[in-house]
Amino acid sequence: MTDLVADISAAEARVDQLRRQLTASTCREVGCDMQSYGGMNAGCGDGCGCSIPVNVCTRCGDCDYGDNARAVTTRAECAERSAA
């Protein structure tokens, strides 16, 4: 049982170390932490009311300006509806 407790303690210490490393890392090293910031019109076409998400990185402040996977899907779905 003592080995199990020691293993858990060692694992927790390693996780703490990795969290500290992540906090000190740049977005270039670990990628941006994109979080929802709001939305914007998808601009699909005439009279379109579609909305797409806009995301901002919590670390570096970079913004995708709605250039993301959800926007691609939204525009494709809108085009399909318009074609029908």
Image (cartoon, helix red, strand yellow):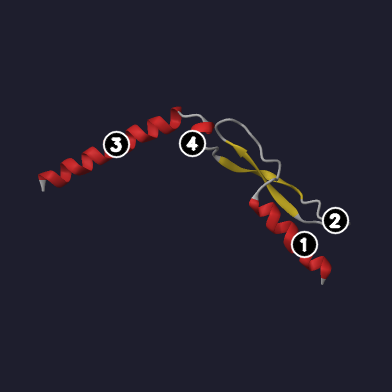
Give yes or no for contact between labels 1 and 2 (Cβ–Cβ under 8 Å): yes
Return the x and y of residue 56 as percentages of the image width and height.
Answer: 62, 38
Residue positioned most to the front: 29
Secondary structure type for disc 3: helix
Image position, residue 41 (x, y; %): 78, 49
Q: Which mark is residue 14?
A: 3
48 left or right of 20 in image: right
Please tell me whether mark 2 sits on a helix, a strand or a loop: loop
Residue at point 67% right, 40% down? 64
| N-terminal label among 3 and 2 | 3
Decide: is 63 above or below 1.
above
**In front: mark 1 or mark 4?**
4
Q: Residue furthest left?
A: 2
How much space separates mark 1 and mark 4, taking CA atoms?
34 Å
Disc 2 residue type? Gly
Query: Image quadrant of residue 84?
Result: bottom right
Mark nearer the N terminus (3 vs 1): 3
Q: Secondary structure at mark 4?
A: helix
Q: CA distance from mark 3 to mark 2?
A: 52 Å
Residue under pointer 2: 45
Identify residue for label 1: 78
Dot 3: few (<14), some (14–19), or many (≥20) neighbours within 10 Å?
Answer: few
Q: In 3D space, how far apart are the residues under numbered discs 2 and 4 (Cα atoms)? A: 36 Å
Q: Looking at the picture, how far across and down is residue 33, in whole percent?
A: 54, 39
Give the residue at mark 4.
30
Q: CA distance from mark 3 to mark 1?
A: 47 Å
